[in-house]
Image (cartoon, rainbow, N blue to C red):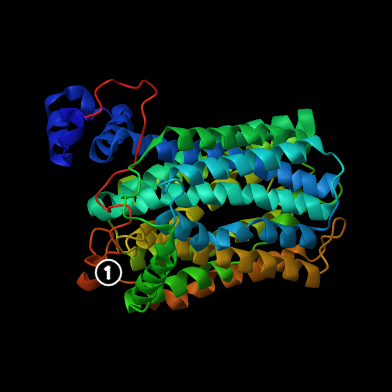
Amino acid sequence: MGEEEELPISVEEVQKKEHKDGIYGSCLCQPVIWLKMLAKEMHWSFVFGVVVVYGISQGLGGSLGRLATEYYMKDVQKVQPSESQFYSGIINIPWIVKPIWGLLTDVLPIFGYHRRPYFIFAGAVGVISMLFLSLHKNLHILFALLFLTAGSAGVAIADVTVDACVAQNSGIHPTLAADMQSLCALSSSIGSLVGFPLSGVLVHLIGPTGVFGVWAVPAMLVVLVGALLKENRTVSNFTYQRVNQNFVDAAKSMWNTLRFPNVWRPCLYMYLSLALSLDIYEGLFYWVTDSKDGPGFSKESMGFIMAVGAVGSLLGAVLYQYGLKDHPFRDLLFWTQLLFGLSGMLDLVLVLRWNLKFGIPDIFFVVIDASVSQMIGRLKWMPLLVLSSKLCPPGIEGTFFALLMSIDNAGLLSSSWGGGMLLHILKVTRTQFNNLWLAILIRSILRITPLSLLFLVPKSDPNTSILPDDITSSKLEDNEIPSTENIELVSLIRTENTS
């Protein structure tokens, strides 16, 4: 490598350069300077990888797939809202078993590589699943669920692999942990902002199954990331007979970390705060697209509404990055959880049609509702992500971060299935929405209950260490990827000097 790669660029040097050049003081240049600082601190390839996985695969691809899946279940499979809510939980099961993918990437190399094969595998699974859904118009619901779940697994595996890089760099650069999570959130939000308007138009023009074919393109880019990824092969003394020992060592390290109160207590809070916020989105989706009882929004309108929600999420990420990232976890979570519960009451105003009594059009009110709810949801989610990244012990960053995210996804699954059960009990169907208001009221009340559990969250701020010294100093066997090594992507143009 050249000298520019060997000499680290500190944050102070970047700040001095900003001071010397007046143009750096412009607000319009701040995002560019911020990205440049991250690229120099952790190598440009890290930033590129995050943008591809979070921005294109999850943000753009996820927004295309989300609206397509909603209409696929509603118009093609013709299932009830409670059933769609249940199927949504099944599709997200691969995100619950993320520790398995994380453990594999940490301790089981393929052809000597820990990351590259998993990126390629994840992208290939996504491409095959989406193309199969696109080419077969009349799939049975079981096969449709199978391929939708496989596509979700592809995204989850790619997410785990890039999360390992994020957690690894959070340990190397602890003061930039919040910045890295902001990069992930901003990439995802911008991708969603671009994808949602396109999704509404594409669902209208080519239908949900056609959009599944388009969804295969972001998966192809994940394959490209795996093909370009540069990493050192596992040391020569590695043998696959030691894999079992690696799994045992990783499990012991995870267990020792989980036993620490400052780890299991916030984990419990993360699960309960998500599980208690029952998800009844499918009932609301069926209602707002119904022309009899609801506003009867078109596919293009739904794409626009979701795009506005992505704007709100983006604003939440920006607000956290530039104003709230240094606040203590417990204080920030108190206000975001409280506002999260209160924002749910906007849905109640819409379903009861009170907005029309005040002369507020449905589309205007829904746009405000979506932007406010997504912004608050992002503000609630960001400190949890930062907290999770700081709980990861060195050596198994990918595995442990995946474990923490699987706890969150288990909470989301409980929320989804609990919401589906609530819709079923209240008899909210494709054509009956009389009790939808009651479901919204119950959900909004439950959203506030996690405030009583905030004692489980540490009072510390994001810039302090949470793990004890004996955990942060411990490492696994020497066959792992060194925690001080940055993952970097191979340049498209190969140079002759490889020394």
Q: Which residue is mark 1?
A: 467
Residue nearest the observer in this picture, 288 or 238: 238
Secondary structure of the residue carrying numbered label 1: loop
Q: Position of residue 264 (x, y in %)?
A: 40, 75
- Quadrant location of the N terminus in the rendered image: top left
Q: Which residue occupies 68% across, 70% down? A: 418
> Relative to 54, is 106 above or below?
below
Residue type at numbered disc 1: Leu
Direction from residue 454 to residue 70 in the image, left or right: right
Occupied quadrant, residue 121: top right
Direction from residue 360 to residue 191 in the image, left or right: left
Q: Position of residue 44 (x, y in %)?
A: 31, 33
- Quadrant location of the C terminus in the rendered image: top left
Residue nearest the observer in this picture, 231 or 111: 111
Direction from residue 178 to residue 423 in the image, left or right: right
Occupied quadrant, residue 126: top right
How many residues crowd mark 1 within 10 Å: few (<14), some (14–19), many (20+)?
A: some
